[in-house]
Every structure is written in structure tokens, then in C-alpha cells.
Image (spheres, grey):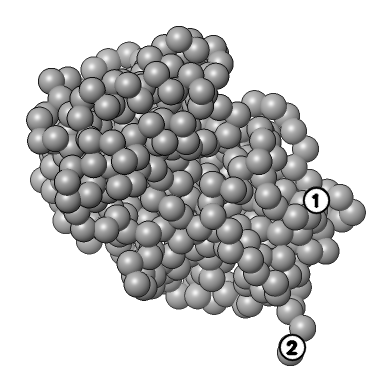
Amino acid sequence: MAETKTRNEIRFILNGADVALTDIAPDATLLDWLRLDRSLRGTKEGCAEGDCGACTVLVGKLSAEGLVYESVNACIRFMGSLDGTHVVTVEHLRGDGEKLHPVQQAVVDFHGSQCGFCTPGFVMSLYALWMKTPNPSDAAIEKALQGNLCRCTGYEAIMRAARAISSYGKAAKDPLAVERNDIAARLEALRDGARVEVGSAKQRLIVPADVDDFAAALEKEPGATIVAGSTDVGLWVTKHMRDISPAIFIGGLDGLRTMSEADGVITIGAGVTYSEAFETLSKRIPALGPLVDRIGGEQVRNMGTIGGNVANGSPIGDTPPPLIALGAQLTLRKGKARRTIPLETFFIAYGKQDRQPGEFVEAVHVPVPAKGTSFAVYKVTKRRDEDITATLGAFHLTLAKDGTVADIRIAYGGMAPTPKRATAVEKALIGKTWSEATVEAAMAEYASDFTPLTDMRATAEYRAMAARNLLLRFYVETTGTKAPFQVSRNEAA
């Protein structure tokens, strides 16, 4: 077996220029580098946690579909994740001309800016949307702007600008359209199959050549921080000032970004982002579509991974409860050895998972609900979009022909130190007639399963009440009656 080549520089394209960095810290963010090293100050710092969108840039990468651009948060995007990509900032939109780009001109003409601080971020999010969907629906526009906050004005002016962009000129005038073939060729040339190692001793960043190289690197450096989408690890740095060195960046590993289905089980590679998983999950398991749409904003969904959401073990992670309710399994890998375990056993205690030193999450295996079963997910937050979960309930019900509960799996986030099943509630339901009386009796068992905490998101009393009521909501919906407070039958969150 040939030895993996190693180089000591990160290579990418910034707007139109080739960049090679041999001296960059593992925790250096794209936002700081753009502003401090390249004086590209159109990319702003607002929240430093991926919520406000003022730092939005585009990152282009080669994929099976060709060259794809996505909006991302530069404030929590580390430089180590950029190898082999094309970074586009708002300064690049005008190309070499004097005229504003159609996206910029539309925002000006329709008064979509007041103080202007957030405007470059809105422009970049709308630019990403316009490239994918030149004539987007209002729903698509609103989804694209979930991760952009403006404190000055209402969004209607921005919506009008978004609707008008395509009337300003053909995409052929767009710089990324004009240079697409050239950029794709340049990115292809950067693919040398080498491992990247920058820095020395503990202060190193590593970009593995492939998944096998990642396994070998982590086995040698079991204490290294694994960085996939950095939507969580980014906050460790920007908010908690934690040292993440040495860091291994795996977001660009094609071997972890695959999805497949066999025998009714969807296998999701640990590096698959929420955006990449959305189409398959929303089609095969419809209740997961609206949930994914409420995980952060578009920028976060373009970066964050399902594998990372599972691996970090957060008690308020949005994907583990529904995956547990579905009976998902997890493949863990250490070196060349693999083992597969039920996902629910992975979470041992707060901050502790069933993962050995040098072991990593390689894939998640999600069974598609069988025909005739009922599955739903409900996320409770203070605001609907881009908010952290107070409590989240997932329910998977199988009824027998006589109307009794043959099986039910109920899992919650935000109710315990880990994502956790409501086993006492399940026991109170199984074998009983699926009726309001049965459900109301089972609701008393929540006290046996959970002792929630009070924090900034919700009180313990509120969480307990909401958790009980979610079961009642699930019952009402599965018996064919719309819950009176439900906005849409398609909204399973």
C-alpha cells in the first residue's frame, strides 16, 4: 500500500486569487482571516456564533453534481476546512465592472437596507439562492434568509428585492457563472490526494487525505478535536475560548459524505450535512423534513452534519431523539475495526458517549418507518426558526389490528442529561387501547422518566408540561383530528 503524501499548506481560491497558507492556527476562523489578513471587511462580525448571518460568504466545492456553492457562516468556519474550495466574499460580486451585481442592485432599489451592517450577509444569502433558483417562491426566500437577522427594518423590502433579482439581467453577467469552468478546473488541480499538516507539536491542524487516513491519524492522535461542520466546535472557540489543538478537519472527506438505502434502512455517512440529507429524509421520512428546516439557518445546515450532531452528545441535539425513536444504529470505527451499536446506547451520561479513544462515528443507519406505523417529531422553542430546543419529542407508534398499542418508541431531547427514551411511558401504553384515556393515564409516568432542569430556554415545570402535551398532540393527530393549534398538516415540528 502506497504511503500517503503530506504537504504543509492549505490551498484554496479566494475570489479570483490562489491562496496557499503554511502558517495558520487550528482555531483560526475565516472571518478573522478575511478581515485582518486580507482587509475584506464586507464580511461582518455580529454574533460570532452562526446566528445573525452578517458574516455570510459562499464556499464552492466540487461534488458529484459539479461545482456547488453554499452560504456559510465565516465566523465559525475554520481555515483548516477550506482546503480545495473556492471562497467568495461580497467584494467579488461586482467582478471587474463598476455596476452593482443584480442582487446588490435589487437590494438598493427596493430599500432593503437601513444601517447596512447586515446587508452584505443578506446579499450573499440571496446570491446563493438566486444561483440555485433564479425565480424562487416566497417560501424559498424565507428559508434562505432564516439565518440572516436585521435589527433595523422589516423583511418585506428584502423579500421584494429577492423577487426582482432575475429581472436585472441574465446569469451570464454573473462573475461565478462566467468563471465557473475555470474555477472548476483550478479546484480539480488542487486535488493532489495528500494529507495536509500545518503547524508543529500540539498546535497542528490536519486535513486527512481520505477516511482511511483519518482513521490512522485519529488512532495516532486520540486526543485530537474532530471538526466536521464546526457549527458546535466553532462556538467552543468563539464563545468559550477553548483550545481545540490538534484539530482534524473531516468536512471535505468524500468517503463520509455518502447516503444509500438498502432493505428499508438509510445509511448516512457521518459527514453528510443537513442540507445534503434533506431531500432524501424529507421524501422517505416526511416528518424529518420540517425538523431539518428548523435546525439553525441555511448557513448552519450547509455546514453542520448529522454525524456531528450525534457524536457531540448534546442533550438538546435535534436529530438523536427522532433517530432513537426510529431504532437507528451507529457504526463506530477505530483504525480498521468497526462496531455497530444501537444509537440509544451511545449516550451514557452528560458529556460522555460510548466511544473509545481514537474511535469515531462513521455512519448512522436509520430504518424507514414501516407502512401503517405513525411517526412524528415536535420541536418546542421560543421562536419558530433558528432557535435552540427547549424540548423535542419523537414518537413512533405501531397499532395492532384490534386498536391496541403493539409497540411505541418515545424519545426526548432537553429533558435529561442525554437524549433519552420515555420507557415508563412506553410501558404504560403498550398492550393498551390507543385512546385518550390511555394516553392521559400514561402521561403521569413522565415523572418516572424525566427530571428536567430549569435554564434560560425553559423552566423545569414548562418542560414537563410540554413533554406530556406532545404525547397528547401525537394521539390527536394519529386519530385523524387536526390539533387546533397546528398551523399546517404538513408541519410535523
State the image quarter where residue 120 is shown: top left
Q: Position of residue 40 (x, y in %)?
A: 53, 39
State the image quarter where residue 296 is shown: top left
Viewer-proximal residue, 298 or 188?
298
In the rendered view, tell whether residue 450 sits above or below residue 326.
above
SS for callout 1: loop
**Residue at horizontal 32%, vertical 14%?**
152
What's the CA distance linking mark 1 and mark 2? 26 Å
Is the residue marked by circle 2 packed among few (<14), some (14-19), or many (20+) residues within 10 Å?
few
Q: Could you tell which of marks 1 and 2 lies nearer the N-terminus?
A: 2
Answer yes or no: is residue 314 visible.
yes
Q: Which mark is residue 346?
A: none
**Residue at horizontal 28%, vertical 42%?**
405
Q: Position of residue 205 (x, y in %)?
A: 74, 54
Is the residue marked by circle 1 packed among few (<14), some (14-19), or many (20+) residues within 10 Å?
some
Q: Which image quarter holds the C terminus?
A: top left
Viewer-proximal residue, 68 or 13?
68
Q: Position of residue 286 (x, y in %)?
A: 24, 49
**Residue at horizontal 48%, vertical 19%?**
447
Task: Give left or right: position of 482 versus 58.
Answer: left
Task: Give left or right: position of 129 versus 485.
Answer: right
Viewer-proximal residue, 72 or 12?
72
What amino acid is at disc 1?
A: Gly
Viewer-proximal residue, 182 or 207?
207
What amino acid is at disc 2?
A: Ala
Q: Position of residue 184 (x, y in %)?
A: 43, 71
In the rendered view, tell whether residue 1 sits above or below residue 38.
below
Answer yes or no: is residue 300 visible.
no
Q: Which mark is residue 223?
A: 1
Give the residue number, with chain letter if any, for mark 2.
Answer: 2
SS for callout 2: loop
